[in-house]
Image (cartoon, grey):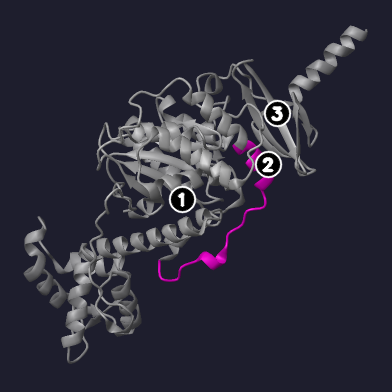
Amino acid sequence: MEEKLKDAVAKVKKQSSRPAVSAILEDGSIVELLYDPEGHRTLFCVAKDAEFRYEDALLARGRRLVPYSPNNNLIKNDVVLLPSKAEEYGTEEALIASVQGFLHRYVDVSPLFEKIASYYVLFSWVYDDFNELPYLRVRGDYGSGKTRFLLTLGSLCYKPIFASGASTVSPLFRILDAFRGTLIIDEADFRLSDERAELVKILNNGNAKGFPVLRSELTQRKEFDPRAYAVFGPKLVATRGFFQDRALESRFITEEMGHTRLREDIPINMPSEYKREALAIRNRLLLFRFRNLRKRRIEENLVDRSIEPRLNQIFIPLLSIIEDRKTRDDMQELARRYQREIVSDRGTGMEGQILEIVKEMRGNSVDGKLAVKDITNWFTDRHGDDYERKITSKWIGNTIRKKLGLKTEKIDSNYSIAASEGAKLDLLFERYGIERKGGEAAPQEQVEPSDGDHGLHGL
């Protein structure tokens, strides 16, 4: 009878057990999954009020939480990296120095990006305190060090998930939803158009809380059941080129790779001790998370009103965890450089060319009319040779209405930009670098990387 009772209890425990990676318990305790590679064992580290302990299982909200198995393919094959214990790190400055020193030993990037990447590691361990976040990207041809950067920096981030371990993008939705860690993507692994589209969904939805990706799952009864997958979290990306979506491009802080000769002290092959070094730093970063989670907040005083809201949105969370004044100043100047590049890129596109013509026409117009037909004629004279297709009033009119968001009205059988759009035009002139506040024309700046800068920029 006693044996049957034990078996029944064990069966109930097994049925109600749920594998977990991280959790916040009802009493405020923070739970994190650990993996001891030497003992081939997983367990929990539970922290509360500056103290922590280790547990093989936990009770939370009537359910028994158990660690993922050490034989889980993601853990066993280093697709997901975890700390093995919590270790003291001393001061935050010492922790940053150890992260930056590790990165400097194995990767050749510009000094500013090296600092940014080091703080991004710390940010990744408390990212869930923020509602928006930026992504880091390295861009360059093969052999420029992109993969080395991903492996080195990624091994220090919070629960890094190396996408190169997946043959397709589809598993990433489930892995991200389960582990809620840092996604590391070598873009060369996603060459097919359908895979690229799936990847773009993750990147477009993953920089702000509250935007899960909806996917239809097939149930055992062969019914489609929509499910929301959480994809919010830090991301490290390597690409050879640009994303076509400008909105997606604006989510990245980017380093151009391969523009300078490789430093002579960078090892060509990664030494065997680098994994042990990375694990030791992850262990210290775990304690950093325990001490800082739910204490980091957006610092509104860092908002720069001279740059666009999107740039503030991606820079302010990272700036909010940087205490070094010099690094903050350099980051803010970088954001302003991005702003200049955005304005310059806009001004050289079709919309900017149209606005230049509209501005000139408005200055010369006697009756104030800005007829689409006249804009088309001016555009054809100036830029007709730049486009393979024929310039038509319909194409110009659609661009004015749909891309620039300007209303048109029919006057004397011709469509013109509505007279009520004057204030909106002034804002567009400023946004596209055609006119600054006060009527001063804005120069089209071309920002060249300085010596040793490696071409750090965003768009």
Q: Which residue is mark 1?
A: 134
Camera-side mark, 2 or 3: 2
**Quick check: 191 above or below 115?**
above
* Badge 2 element: helix
Residue drawn at x 27%, y 53% is: 449
Q: Which mark is residue 372?
A: none
Residue 264 position in % (x across, y down): 30, 32
Residue in the image at 38% along x and 47% along y: 111
Q: Is residue 72 magenta?
A: no
Sequence-first disc among 2 and 3: 3
Towards the viewer: 97 or 321: 97
Residue 299 in magenta?
Answer: yes
Determine the CA span between mark 1 and mark 3. Answer: 29 Å
Q: Which residues are magenta?
A: 285-307
Q: Determine if residue 81 is in view.
A: no
| Mark with earlier residue (1, 3) | 3
Q: Residues within 10 Å of mark 2 (few under 14, many from 20)?
A: many
Q: Which residue is mark 3?
A: 44
Quadrant position of the N terminus in the picture: top right
Question: What label sits on residue 290 in the rendered view?
Answer: 2
Q: Earlier in the sequence, mark 1 or mark 2?
A: 1
- Crowd band around label 3 with a 10 angstrom C-alpha radius: few (<14), some (14–19), many (20+): many
- Which secondary structure, mark 1? loop
Q: CA distance from mark 1 to mark 2?
A: 22 Å
Q: Label 2, label 3: how many angstroms apart (C-alpha)? A: 13 Å
Determine which quarter of the picture holds residue 2.
Answer: top right
Amino acid beneath label 2:
Phe
Q: Position of residue 87 (x, y in %)?
A: 66, 33
Tell me, yes or no, if residue 239 can be seen here. Answer: yes
